[in-house]
Image: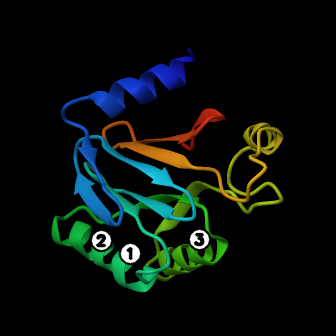
Amino acid sequence: MSELQTRFLELRRHPETMIVHYPGDSVSSGPIYSRGYICCNAVVLLGRNTAGLTHYDLRIESEIYLNEIVNRMERQGQFPNCAVVVGGDETHFERNLRILENRRISVVNGYSDCWNEVPLVTKDVFESLRRKRNKNRFTPKDVLVVPETKEVLVHRIGLDYIKLN
């Protein structure tokens, strides 16, 4: 078992880890976890001492839920200074990127099942992901966020564990 896999599994099981159920989102100063992203998208918002995590598909408009969670973090005095995006559906993913840009929240990294060229992840990581790409269009993913260390960990089910920051 890799060090990254061990860390992911330990944090996922930790009693203080908040679970985000689909459809939903959460803001927390402790670890946040959600599972089963397939065509859904995750947006991780990283503030000074907290993080936000979303788990939605296109049935709920990005303009509604993403602006709502950013506003909630702002009301808590935790304006997100950066974001990490993880996606299945490409249209939803692109809408999330546009909203973040409009809100002036920089996207520091991300992963999408639909990418065909090197985006925000390093070339080595991208090539590793490409070699292990699922035969289906969407790969089920779990996302874990650790606000204290600003870690965003992704488990591509049946494939690998990756760190996106």
Residue at 25% of width from left, 57% of height from top?
27
| Quarter of the image with the N terminus in it | top right
Number of the label disc, if any, that sits on residue 81: none
Residue type marked 3 = Phe
Number of the label disc, if any, that sits on residue 69: 2
- Indicate the quadrant where residue 65 lies: bottom left
- Distance between mark 2 and mark 1 Cα atoms: 5 Å
Residue at 51% of width from left, 24% of height from top?
5
- Distance between mark 3 and mark 2 Cα atoms: 16 Å
Between residue 140 and residue 90, name the one nearer to us.
140
Asked if disc 2 and disc 1 are in contact, CB closer than 8 Å, the reply is: yes
Between residue 105 and residue 154, name the one nearer to us.
154
Between residue 116 and residue 147, name the one nearer to us.
116
| Quarter of the image with the C terminus in it | top right
- Give neighbour class at mark 1: few <14, some 14-19, many 20+ (Cα, 10 Å): many
Q: Secondary structure at mark 1?
A: helix
- Indicate the quadrant where residue 113 lies: bottom right
Residue type marked 2 = Ile
Number of the label disc, if any, that sits on residue 93: 3
Question: In the shown orientation, is residue 123 left or right of residue 89?
Answer: right
Q: Secondary structure at mark 2?
A: helix
Number of the label disc, if any, that sits on residue 66: 1
Residue 67 picture location, percent across and down: 35, 79
Question: In the shown orientation, is residue 34 left or right of residue 76?
Answer: right
- Indicate the quadrant where residue 156 lies: top right
Q: Secondary structure at mark 3?
A: helix
Residue type marked 1 = Leu
- Give neighbour class at mark 2: few <14, some 14-19, many 20+ (Cα, 10 Å): some
Residue 148 picture location, percent across and down: 31, 38
